[in-house]
Image: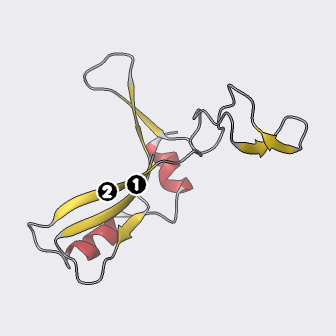
Amino acid sequence: MTSKEAKNKYVHYLRVGDLKKELEKYPDDALVVSQRVEDRYYEGVDISGMTGTLEDGSTGILPSGSKSTGWDTIKKPDPFYEGWQQEYTPVWGICHYKDDKNCLYLDLHY
């Protein structure tokens, strides 16, 4: 997926304008952190052994070698390793923890 396709496809995610507004609420020395949420929806992820829709349309345990056909990512060439690609996905949003402005908390699924 290209960056332009992602911009049009993902509408309920963090945008630069949203981030700019939120950053005004944080001091310059706040640390930016992200929560790594492992997700099985990404294209090509091994989902063997999970419950899902089988080839015959019934629900059951997915056989060995089953791969997800879900969310695709923006792929960019790795700057150091020829033939490798970096994969990017939208940041979901900023998490607010009451008055904690020591860190800017972001949700990131991978």
Q: Which residue is drawn at 57% across and 35% down?
A: 45
The secondary element bearing badge 1 is classed as strand
Question: Which corner quadrant of the image does residue 9 belong to?
Answer: bottom right
Number of callouts: 2
| Residue topped by disc 1 | 108
Identify the amino acid type marked 2. Ser
Residue 2 appears at what percent x and percent y? 48, 40
- Residue 66 versus residue 95 in the image, above or below: above
- Is residue 88 toward the left or the right of residue 60 in the image? left
Residue 66: mark in rendering: none
Crowding at label 1, few (<14), some or many (≥20) Cα neighbours within 10 Å? some
Query: Could you classify mark 2 by the number of other residues whose Cα lies within 10 Å: few (under 14), some (14-19), or many (20 or more)?
Result: some
Tell me whether the residue at label 2 lies in contact with that at label 1, contact meaning CB atoms closer than 8 angstroms: yes
From the top left corner, tell me how far across and down residue 83 is, in percent.
39, 16
* Secondary element type, mark 2: strand
User: What residue is rendered at 19% in x and 76% in y?
Assistant: 101
In the rendered image, the vertical position of residue 34 relative to residue 69, given as above or below: below
Q: Residue at x 40, y 54 (%)?
A: 108
Residue 92 position, x and y percent, is: 44, 61
Report the residue marked by disc 2. 34
